[in-house]
Amino acid sequence: GAGQAGGEKGDAKKEAGGPEKEKEGAENAKLARGRSNIAYTPSTSMQETVANFLVRMAFLTSESTERDYRVLHERSLELLTQALKLWNPVNIKISYIEKLLASNAHRNLQPMPALVTGLEIISRVVSEQPEPFCKINHAQVVHVIEPTLSSQNSGLVDKLGSILRKVNEALMPPAEAPPGGPSGAASGKAEMWQIHKAFDDIVAAYLLGAEKNGSSEAKKGTLPQVAALLRILIVLSEKSQYYLDKFSGSLIKALKRYAQEMSSADPSHKKKGASARTPGSQEASARRNPNICVLLRLLSKKILTSPEQKQMLLHTLITLMTSKPPDGTVMLEILNAIWSWVELSNDTQANLSVKETVLFLQRLAPAERHGVNVGEWNRNFLSIVLQICSSTKVTGERAQELRKETFNKVERLFLMGLQSRDPKLRHAFFQLHNKGIERTLFARLKHIVSGQEWEAMASKFWLKQGIDFLFAILLENEKIRLAPTSSKLKSLLETELAPDKKDGQDVAMAEAAEPAKKDAKPAEKEAEPAKEEAKPAKEEAKPAEKE
């Protein structure tokens, strides 16, 4: 009986411990599966097979517009990115991209699906594994540069700029490269340097074509191509001055060419009877002016060292500013470039002298009156003039002279700051004027009447500004005091209570004069009858005068 009872208890314990053991077994199995997943790594050949299969799948589904194929295309790119992060390095091969591009070009597909997908794949691979990819596919990377520049697609151009920036970041800074170029064997990145050199050759060819108004060979240097190239140079010049240092002369020559074309398109230069502007010239102007703006933006980041380049740049700016009608966006870029050069300049290096800077600002000051229709032009111009006149970032003798000349020959000449509709700008310029005048009433009046020329405000009530200059020297916390030489008034209260000696003499003289006044009254009464007797005689004389 005792044994039977013990067996029943044991069975109960087994039943109670059954669920717990099942949970432990499931957890152990899960851990075992996790260990097996972690331990498993596909071979290198398997990794390359999977990654290149995803690349081919992305190219294969790139041309289709069906929803299922587009989903499969995006999924292939996502898995490729994950594979590149998980397996490093893995050899990606896109040697067949040249055939795909040729096929797309033959069918006139715009934009070319192979180019769009190829740039996307190259961007993803270069982000994760730049050196292994460029070592195998550097020729393919170079091959997609020119089709991208000719595509007139800003999205593709930006993607190419991102790729080239990543390649440059993977290399050592281009400025540190030896004059003759890097030695491929020594650097270990010869293929990446080949990409870098190939792009330099393309830049030189396109800028030369722009200088010669588009070369006949292969049509390099057209306005759309140069626009795409400049868009990439803006991206590459954010962290490195290499391209500005190497191609500054070519950039200035291209800018000069565009300025001459802009000036020749001036209707005032054409003969009488000729049409002002044809649709073709308007289209060319719409494409050329953005290139001028980007060129100015690039050159504004560099201080030129060559006197010839400085002289060419100076003449080009004058040509751009004298063209009629002036283009508002170009004027605004010139203004921003002048401020950038002011910030970069010092006592020894500067693109423009103090005199040239002031002359350009004087030329730009009345630009709004010359037909320029730019939003917020007045505010932008005044903000830059205010920064030049009050900035403490730029120091040195040249900066002090520039501040003084800009205020005296730009602001005091045109008085645009005092006429600004922006209260903050108007107050800031008023403070500049106020600091330059002595805090005495005579000095302020002399400045208002003879010192300041108010012709720029002839159409407005300029006396308001003059009164503001007078009120600016008032001391609000002190009482008003009379001048020492002003007349004094007697206190009425003191006169009633205690008249002084002089006042007593006046009273005595008044009392002495009263009897004389009384004696004069009877004499006046005696004279009255004589006046009455004279009246009839006057009346009798009137008829005789009439006769």
Image (cartoon, rainbow, N blue to C red):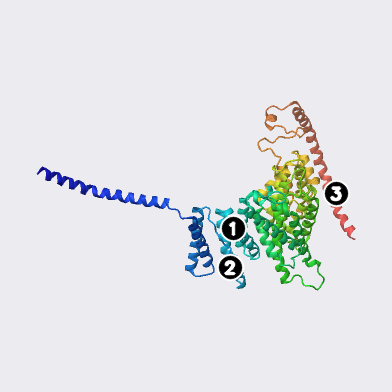
Residue 212 in percent (x, y) is at 77, 63
- Relative side of 156 to 505, left or right: left
Tag 1: residue type?
Ile
- Relative side of 459 to 37, left or right: right
The foreground one among 476 and 529 is 476
Q: Real-space Cα distance between discs 3 and 2?
A: 137 Å
- Relative side of 349 to 31, left or right: right
Q: Real-space Cα distance between discs 2 and 1?
A: 18 Å
Badge 3 local density, few (<14 within 10 Å), some, or many (20+)?
Answer: few
Q: Quadrant of the N terminus?
A: top left
Q: Is residue 324 visible?
A: no
The foreground one among 311 and 318 is 311
> Which numbered dot is residue 100?
2
Tag 2: residue type?
Leu
Instruction: Please say if the residues under marks 3 and 2 sit with CB atoms less than 8 Å apart.
Output: no
Residue shown at the point (81%, 44%) measured from the top left: 528
Q: In terms of image quadrants, where is residue 317?
A: bottom right
Q: Which residue is mark 1?
A: 136
Residue 480 in percent (x, y) is at 69, 36
Q: Real-space Cα distance between discs 3 and 1?
A: 141 Å
Q: Which structural element holds mark 3?
A: helix
Residue shown at the point (72%, 61%) measured from the top left: 205
Whichever of callouts 2 and 1 sits on the residue coming sooner in the sequence is: 2
The foreground one among 531 and 2 is 2
> Which numbered dot is residue 534?
3
Q: In terms of image quadrants, where is residue 540?
A: bottom right
Q: Nearer the viewer, mark 3 or mark 2?
A: 2
Residue shown at the point (69%, 43%) measured from the top left: 393
Residue 435 in percent (x, y) is at 73, 41
Q: Which structural element holds mark 1?
A: helix
Q: Which structural element holds mark 2?
A: helix
Badge 2 local density, few (<14 within 10 Å), some, or many (20+)?
Answer: some
